[in-house]
Image: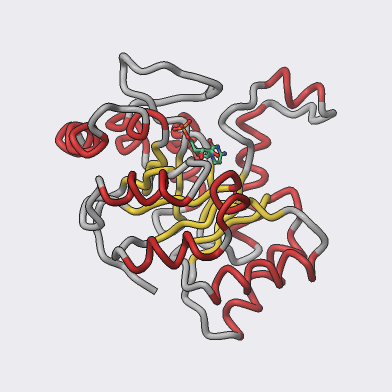
């Protein structure tokens, strides 16, 4: 596993084909960011894209948000770890037994891949949760799922940076908070709802900031990344 940078930025390589993904990667510097491979790119390209990003020196967060029965999820996590990724994730809604199984298979296999859980997607609102039958306030649901992830032995959670202050104070500094929904003041929010600026997110206690379209749609992605880093 690579650990090549102290930068808190993870750039979401939400591209549809290998050449666009590698063009973006080649415009970025592995000492300034990690890269996130999500469902779009992985479904289009498979493990070869992860290998190609590793070959370029990047740490890769494989963001496939596994959500299935315990054995299937744990074996998928192991398959991700076999690729040498730095971080992989599941949905906390798989429950504690399934999350514990994923973690114990990683530990028993001697992998140091970080395993984190998605709490409530940053594109979701209170109304969306209610429509799904989740009646607790959104921040309580995030805290509940984060505590469950911690009890299950995971290394951290994905949440909104708006929730980071409460989670850090409740779960401690070692439990990693990975926060998408990051936007600069002048950026388009797109489909994200619970957003923060990069500096707010770090101030709130985020450990890693996942940034996609703010960087990937910029005419000069590296310049935008450097601008964000300079502001932190
Ligand atoms: O373009 P944008 O900055 O909104 O990209 C955010 C990235 O983080 C996307 O790849 C999205 O799938 C991912 N993500 C998210 N919310 C989560 C987990 C992951 O937006 N809770």
Horizontally, residue 79 falls left or right of residue 199, namely: right
Task: Find residue 141 and report its horizontal and vertical position in percent.
Answer: 68, 36
Viewer-proximal residue among 53 and 33: 53
Visual colour scheme: secondary structure
Q: Residue at x 79, y 66 (%)?
A: 70
Q: Residue at x 25, y 45 (%)?
A: 27
Q: Residue at x 49, y 51 (%)?
A: 37
Horizontally, residue 58 falls left or right of residue 138, namely: left
Viewer-proximal residue among 176 and 223: 223
Viewer-proximal residue among 126 and 114: 114
Q: Residue furthest front?
A: 19
Viewer-proximal residue among 130 and 31: 31
Asked where in the image residue 218 lies, by quadrant, the reply is top left
> How many numbered discs, if any?
0
Horizontally, residue 115 falls left or right of residue 148, namely: left
On-image quarter of the C terminus: top left
Position of residue 73 relative to residue 171, above or below, is below
Task: Find residue 5 and report its horizontal and vertical position in percent.
Answer: 25, 60
On-image quarter of the N terminus: bottom left
Horizontally, residue 186 falls left or right of residue 126, namely: left
Q: Residue furthest left?
A: 230
Q: Residue at x 58, y 60 (%)?
A: 46
Task: Find residue 185 and report its horizontal and vertical position in percent.
Answer: 31, 16
Task: Find residue 203 and report its horizontal and vertical position in percent.
Answer: 30, 35
Position of residue 58 relative to residue 184, above or below, is below
């Amino acid at each position: 596993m690579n650990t090549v940078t102290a930068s808190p930025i993870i750039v979401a390589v939400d591209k549809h084909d290998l050449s666009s993904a590698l063009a973006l990667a080649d415009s970025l510097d592995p000492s300034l960011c990690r890269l996130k491979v999500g469902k779009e790119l992985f479904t289009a390209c498979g493990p070869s894209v992860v290998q190609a990003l590793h070959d370029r020196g990047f740490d890769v967060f494989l963001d496939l948000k596994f959500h299935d029965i315990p054995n299937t999820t744990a074996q998928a996590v192991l398959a991700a770890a076999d690729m040498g990724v730095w971080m992989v994730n599941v949905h906390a809604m798989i429950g504690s037994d399934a999350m514990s199984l994923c973690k114990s298979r990683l530990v028993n296999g001697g992998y140091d891949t970080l395993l984190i859980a998605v709490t409530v997607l940053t594109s979701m609102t209170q109304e969306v949760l209610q429509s799904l039958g989740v009646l607790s306030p959104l921040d309580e649901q995030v805290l509940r799922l984060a505590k469950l992830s911690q009890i299950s032995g995971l290394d951290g959670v994905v949440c909104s940076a708006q929730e980071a202050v409460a989670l850090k104070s409740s779960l401690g500094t070692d439990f990693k908070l990975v926060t998408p929904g990051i936007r600069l003041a002048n950026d388009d929010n797109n489909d994200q709802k619970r957003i923060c600026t990069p500096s707010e997110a770090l101030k709130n206690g985020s450990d890693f900031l996942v940034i996609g379209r703010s960087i990937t749609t910029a005419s000069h992605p590296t310049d935008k990344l450097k601008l964000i880093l300079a502001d932190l």
